[in-house]
């Protein structure tokens, strides 16, 4: 089954139709997606700002990380849940949208950036916990994270415009 | 600009006193008050409005920046307010969090206002008839007054948070959340 066939099959299902045609659930879903964005972006920005070395400069990196990570995960869960349901409601529109493809690519890159960061430089945090600015690779990870999440938001919003 | 606030408040009370009329304009729209029409109509005819309407790229770009700044603002306030309520980030005091995010809040407010004015210029006639735009402007006025008068007292809060600190968190969340919901509703109603 190709991706297009999968999207077609998903769109023809009763759940997709129910969400798409609902006059209250869909706006609530989209509103929650936006709310989740705010809830997730702020803690992500705080940690990235510390990694880049522009905020929380006198605080240990590990302390900044562990104080904002729970909120990030909460926001991320809300984003994924509402995001999956939103995709479910109009998979064909998403499939045909160039911006949605950019969003998916940016999401994958943001995930890879986090994965690489956590499996390399993040493991040695203890050695540069109080350094400001932190090592180059940590600053790069923070900068990439901010850029990629901004790209995700841009591409996400542009998916809805039918440009 | 400040003179608009009491005017908007007066209108809020008049809306509350008024019943719904299915034949007339939407209950909470500026269209309820014909005296506003010349202003909306004038903005609609300005060269900037005509320019934006003639392009396809200005509106999406400005609106996306508007939403990006909204995420930064609402998110930053979430951090402070959730701390005030004792729900998250208990490793730091509200005062410490405010110290780190207040510049982000101010920059976001400025970007939101600038992009918001451009979005208004782009489609004043639609907003004149919108049932969500009127309430949004009232909540926005209240939110900004609250943000820059009472809310800065949060800066003095260390580990112990008095009951009025929690109240301020709820008012702050309620007002800005209301602004966001009404704003999103402009696209739906």
Image (tube, rainbow, N blue to C red):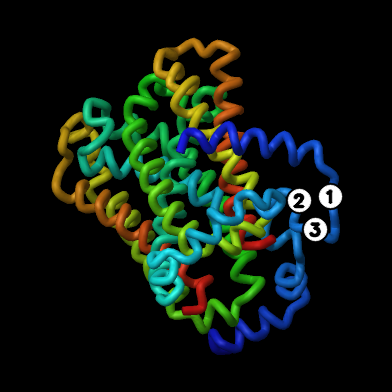
Q: Position of residue A49 (x, y in %)?
A: 28, 41
Residue hosting label 1: B20
Q: Chain of mark 1?
A: B
Q: CA distance from mark 1 to mark 3?
A: 8 Å
Q: Gap in Å between the C-alphas at discs 1 and 2?
A: 6 Å
Q: For the point 54% across and 40% down, which residue is it?
A: B140
**Whether marks 1 and 2 lie on the same chain:** yes
The subunit carrying tag 3 is B
Q: Position of residue A42 (x, y in %)?
A: 42, 42
Q: CA distance from mark 2 to mark 3?
A: 8 Å
Q: Position of residue A94 (x, y in %)?
A: 54, 77
Residue highlighted by disc 3: B24
Residue under the image location 67 percent in, 79 percent down: A10
Q: Chain of mark 2?
A: B
| Co-location on one chain, circles 1 and 3 | yes
Question: How many residues crowd around disc 2 within 10 Å: few (fewer than 14), some, or many (20 or more)?
Answer: many
Residue located beneath label 2 in the image:
B27
Query: On the picture, is B180 further left or further right than B56?
Result: right
Pointers 2 and 3 in contact (C-beta within 8 Å): no
């Amino acid at each position: 089954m190709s991706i297009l066939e999968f999207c077609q099959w998903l769109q023809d299902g009763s759940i997709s139709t129910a969400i798409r045609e609902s006059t209250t659930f869909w706006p609530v879903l989209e509103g929650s997606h936006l709310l989740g964005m705010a809830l997730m972006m702020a803690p992500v920005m705080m940690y990235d700002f510390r990694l880049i070395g522009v905020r929380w400069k006198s605080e240990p990196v590990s302390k900044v990380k562990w104080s904002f990570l729970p909120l990030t995960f909460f926001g991320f869960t809300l984003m994924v849940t509402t995001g999956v349901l939103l995709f479910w409601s109009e998979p064909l529109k998403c499939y045909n949208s160039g911006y949605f493809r950019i969003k998916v690519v940016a999401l994958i890159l943001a995930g890879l950036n986090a994965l690489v960061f956590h499996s390399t430089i993040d493991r040695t945090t203890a050695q540069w916990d109080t350094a400001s600015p932190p090592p180059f690779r940590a600053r790069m990870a923070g900068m990439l994270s901010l850029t990629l999440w901004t790209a995700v938001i841009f591409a996400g919003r542009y998916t809805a415009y039918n440009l | 600009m400040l003179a608009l606030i009491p005017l908007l408040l007066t209108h809020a009370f008049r809306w509350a006193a008024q019943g719904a009329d299915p034949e007339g304009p939407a209950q909470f729209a500026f269209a309820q008050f014909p005296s506003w029409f010349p202003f909306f109509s004038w903005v609609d005819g300005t060269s900037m409005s005509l320019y934006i309407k003639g392009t396809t790229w200005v509106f999406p770009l400005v609106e996306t920046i508007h939403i990006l700044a909204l995420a930064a603002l609402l998110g930053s306030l979430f951090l402070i307010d959730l701390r005030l309520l004792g729900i998250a980030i208990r490793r730091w005091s509200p005062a410490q969090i405010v110290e780190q995010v207040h510049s982000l809040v101010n920059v976001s407010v400025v970007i939101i206002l600038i992009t918001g004015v451009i979005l208004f210029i782009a489609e004043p006639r639609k907003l004149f008839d919108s049932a969500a735009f009127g309430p949004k402007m009232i909540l926005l006025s209240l939110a900004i007054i609250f943000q820059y008068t009472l809310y800065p007292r949060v800066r003095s809060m260390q580990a112990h948070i008095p009951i009025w600190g929690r109240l301020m968190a709820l008012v702050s969340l309620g007002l800005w959340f209301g602004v966001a919901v009404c704003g999103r509703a402009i696209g739906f109603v």
